[in-house]
Amino acid sequence: MATQVLVVDDEKMIVKGIRYALEHDGYEVETAYDGETALDMIKNKAYDLIVLDVMLPKLDGIQVCQMVREFSEVPIIMLTAKSEDMDKILGLEYGADDYMTKPFNILELKARIKAIIRRSHGTHDKKENVLEIGGLKINLDSRQVFTDGKEVNLTAKEFDLLELLARNAGKVYSREKLLDVVWGYDYPGDERTVDVHVRRLREKIEPRSSEPTYIQTKWGVGYFFKD
């Protein structure tokens, strides 16, 4: 059975982006745009995880979290546009499992969701979190990359890009789609950003960057990871 996630936020574009990203990974996603509706949904269905915004109409996210904890231990990740430590302390004090500040990286959110669900289900098999392709090893938990046993230092965005492509080997991504997923739908940069990061990745992980083994170009379309 697919993992059931409830996403609660009054910003519909954020909900749409999270929903698309999670459904792409096989999650079943339901949505709500205010605290009262979310609370009713949580009372009537057993979700595996809830992504909950702090600033909501009718009931705010802190109130919803507090009320949910009266009858359920479902994991909750809270989202907020505020970055003050007190907001974080309040969220965790009322039972949130994790906390992310907007704007956030959707790949980081997905990684946290996966880690929390794995912990809540009592699954600790590290093998499922390591991708090994030829001489390339990608540890998804520690965000480390090794080529032929030697660690390669990647920037956060280089790792995010590599993870997305490697997880979906054989799937071709346009530069525009890579910008949307890795950098965020509101990123002000252009598609050349993707080309620069692909070039740097190839220089770091490919045996010969001029004749790439892993990250391939689909001319006129975009990039894909060779499966």
Image (tube, grey):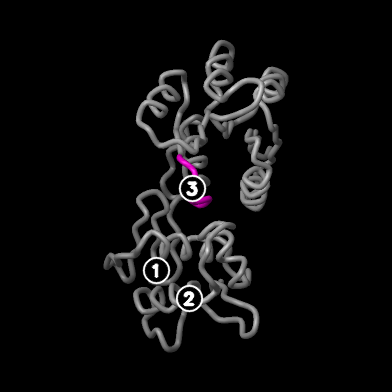
| Amino acid residing under circle 2 | Tyr
**Which residue is rendered at x = 38% and y = 76% of the image?**
200
Rendered location of residue 44, percent (x, y): 72, 19
Circle 1 residue: 136
Q: Secondary structure at mark 1?
A: strand
Residue mark closest to the camera, 3 vs 2:
3
Q: Quadrant of residue 42?
A: top right
Q: Secondary structure at mark 3?
A: loop
- 154 lies above or below 203: above
Rendered location of residue 184, percent (x, y): 54, 57
Residues shaded magenta: 101-107
Q: How many marks?
A: 3
Q: Which numbered marker is on residue 104?
A: 3
Q: Quadrant of the N terminus?
A: top right
Rendered location of residue 204, percent (x, y): 34, 75
| Amino acid residing under circle 1 | Leu
Question: Toward the viewer: 70 or 187?
Answer: 187
Q: Quadrant of residue 135?
A: bottom left
Circle 2 residue: 214
**Which residue is rendered at x = 35% and y = 63% of the image?**
155
Sooner in the amino-acid sequence: mark 3 or mark 1:
3
Residue mark closest to the camera, 3 vs 1:
3
Sooner in the amino-acid sequence: mark 1 or mark 2:
1
Q: Residues within 10 Å of mark 1 (few under 14, many from 20)?
A: some
Q: Is residue 104 magenta?
A: yes
Q: Quadrant of the C terminus?
A: bottom right
Estimate the spatial distance between the alpha carbons at disc 1 and disc 2, rounded to whole Å: 9 Å
